[in-house]
Image (cartoon, rainbow, N blue to C red):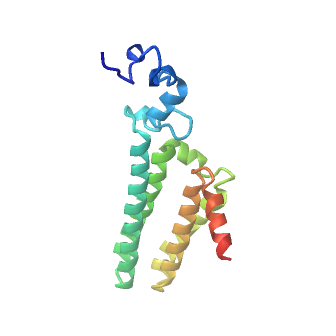
Amino acid sequence: MSWNPFKSNDAPQTGGMGSWMNIEGGAMRAAATGELTGEPSAFEKMGFELTRQQRIIGFAGCLVFGFALSIIGSIMLFFGNTTLFAILYSIGVIVSLVGTGFLIGFARQLRSMFDPVRLWATVVMLLAFVMVWVSAFAIGVPFLPLIFVVILFLAYIWYTLSYIPYARSMVKSIFSKFM
């Protein structure tokens, strides 16, 4: 008889993993379903579930792709194409923000953007986004939007780190060693 770790009635009764590992327990179920926040899956209401690994890959993929689009858009600004810059940059920011939704869920993300722990990062992120548009279309100085791009992405990263336990503390600790 072969042992199947996912069926509790097949677990060996004496010794082996089955005697100490309770697959039916809440902690194992949470780990197996990929819960990151202690709440039901962020995608349960849409009719499908993503594992923890799939959600982290979705987050990282959106972050990298959004950042790449924003950088390409910023390069287009140096070539004088402000329209392409605005389009690519806007899509890049939206894609990056969607990435955070993979971690905690999209509706919860919108509700939690103005929590006290994220308030300043959100405000700086939104103001920098507006200033990119203003500096690109109204002011017209080619390097000024890039300054706001850098500010925006630093604010976005700080915003994102607020969802990862102890991530901000770790970053502060690393940078305090250099100062």
Q: Residue at x 65, y 56 (%)?
A: 119
Q: Nearer the viewer, residue 59 or 149?
A: 59
Rendered residue at 39%/23% (across/down) = 6
Q: Nearer the viewer, residue 72 or 139?
A: 72
**In the image, residue 69 lies at what x, y percent?**
37, 67
Is residue 75 in view?
yes
Foreground pick, 22 / 70: 22
Point 48% across, 84% down: residue: 143
> Is residue 126 among the parts visible in the rendering?
no
Residue 123 rendering spot, x and y as whole percentages: 62, 62
The x and y percentages for residue 43 are 43, 37
Nearer to us in this view, 57 or 122: 57
Report whether 48 appears left or right of 166.
left
Residue at image position (47%, 15%) is 14
For residue 95, above or below residue 75: above
* Residue 164 spot, x, y in % from top left: 57, 51
Give the position of the C terminus as an image quadrant: bottom right
Say how many tags the image has: 0
Q: Residue furthest front?
A: 15
Look at the image and tell me in which quarter the N terminus lies.
top left
